[in-house]
Image (cartoon, grey):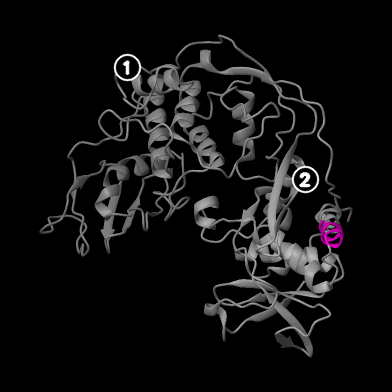
Amino acid sequence: MKFKKITAAVMLAVYMVLLNFNAYAEVLPNFNQINLYDEYTYSDVNSGEWYYYYVGFAYEYGIMSGTSEGYFEPGGRITIAEAITVAARLNAMYYGNNINLSSQRDYAFNNHYTGRLGTVDGGAKYTVPTYGRIEVSDGDNYFGDTPKSNHYIRMEGVGTQSSSAMSWFVPYLTYAASEGIVTPTEFSGRYSSPATRSELAHILYRALPECYSRINEISPIPDVNSASSYYAEILKMYEAGVLTGSDEYGTFYPNSYVQRCEAAAMVSRILNTDLRVQFTLNQNKPYVTLNYTWRYPYNGRTFGINVDISYYDYNYFVSKPRTYNNYAVYAQDVADETALYTISEALRGMAIENGFTSDYDIAGFIAAFVQALEYQDDMLYKGYREYPKYPFETLFEQGGDCEDTSVLLAKMLKQLGFGAVLLVSESHMAVGVQTSGRGNLSYGGVEYYYVETTESGWRLGEVPGDMVGENMEVVYI
């Protein structure tokens, strides 16, 4: 098998994206203006902001509204529940359907729902359409089915304050599932979580799949390819001018979260084809210059290094499937060996030039580089409880959690000839490294220094208090 070799590279010349607004049609059929919008509608949407008219268009046609009276919260994140609601409204208006929010069936909501119908004392009531069935139990669990799927919708853990806080969403979810916009269990347990850019594109595309005529010929999107989730939908939305990317290369950032103002722009371009953008992408391979700083010794001077990395190389790893039962896989992929070795050798050279010549100091110098990366919680940054990353992803995103930084450090040290292993406990991961010193833990007749990777200030051999006595499995890479 021929493996792709990745190298740190030089920034190429930049060409601007050619953007221009062209009229192709007007508002899609069956959409009518139902609200009036002006600069006083939302106190937090200034008429000078780029998104002012997009917010207004989405509001006037009843697709998006504010988060409270007089506030749109343009910089807030749109949740998956809100994205599905928007998609349901788009679909219902376009096809002339009705999302029935009237009181045709009352369902009670409390912590001990015992019947499918009827009244429960003290329960907060809400209504759902006649075409779906909803059951509630244990306060955080909703179940329903639809005539089309006959599968249950599971909404476990949707409410962070109280379960009734999500009752407004039930009719929209039921409708979206019945119309095939989402599958009944597609986002179970994550409805109150922020939507990623790729998830929002997928949900909105599914609302009106026949309404995306091609107006652009799109070259490869830097960070989305055929192996990426929802690639087909994202590409069609680029081709239709609904999505343009975040820069002249069309970089999409599929796993980043979406601001409400950005969602309003997408909705407006879906509704009104006059607003869709005809553009071309820069054909040159895009690079990003990443700046890293760290201290060594930990009360010593500050060091820094700049690295140019290709979006395409990063996307190669982003698109790879995840595995959760063998973290050694992330350190063993050979595709990033050239790039990581280049950086590792540069760091070793910096250490030696500054008088850190022992094995202990060289390994400590590189550990300090990794420790200075940002700690990034998987749920907050990726929307998943666990999302292990390849070392190249951790470098590019300049952060990760304990397994991400441990895999990165172990691989960098091993490339330089150090013996390095992963130390895995039930809730944490660190690195064991061999140097010319004795080390402070032994396994299989070999002594290792314990290395903490998630916070600056830990020397080789220092063990956090909560890890003392912890059972750890040794994983070879």
How crowded pointer 1 is (Cα within 10 Å; few <14, some 14-19, many 20+) is rated as some
In the picture of the structure, the residue carrying the numbered disc 1 is: 37
Front-lying residue, 320 or 286: 286
Residue 462: % across, % down: 64, 77
How crowded pointer 2 is (Cα within 10 Å; few <14, some 14-19, many 20+) is rated as some
In the picture of the structure, the residue carrying the numbered disc 2 is: 307
Residue 420: % across, % down: 77, 73
Is residue 348 highlighted in magenta?
A: yes
Front-lying residue, 402 or 241: 402
Front-lying residue, 29 or 266: 266
Furthest-right residue in view?
Answer: 2
Identify whether 228 is placed above or below 353: above
Residue 101 location, quadrant: top left
Which span is picked out in magenta? 347-354
Quadrant (top left, top right, bottom left, bottom right) of the C terminus: bottom right
In this rendering, would 110 be left or right of 50?
left
In this rendering, would 185 be left or right of 167?
right
Q: Which mark is residue 203?
A: none
Q: Is mark 1 on a helix, strand or loop?
A: loop
Q: Can you see residue 215?
A: no
Q: How far apart are marks 2 and 1 (CA)?
A: 47 Å
Say which amino acid is labelled 1: Tyr
- At a point 57% along the width and 86% down the height, the residue shown is 469
Q: Are the residues flagged by discs 2 and 1 in contact, CB closer than 8 Å? A: no
Q: What element carries label 2?
A: strand
Say which amino acid is labelled 2: Val
Of marks 2 and 1, the one in the foreground: 2
Quadrant (top left, top right, bottom left, bottom right) of the N terminus: bottom right
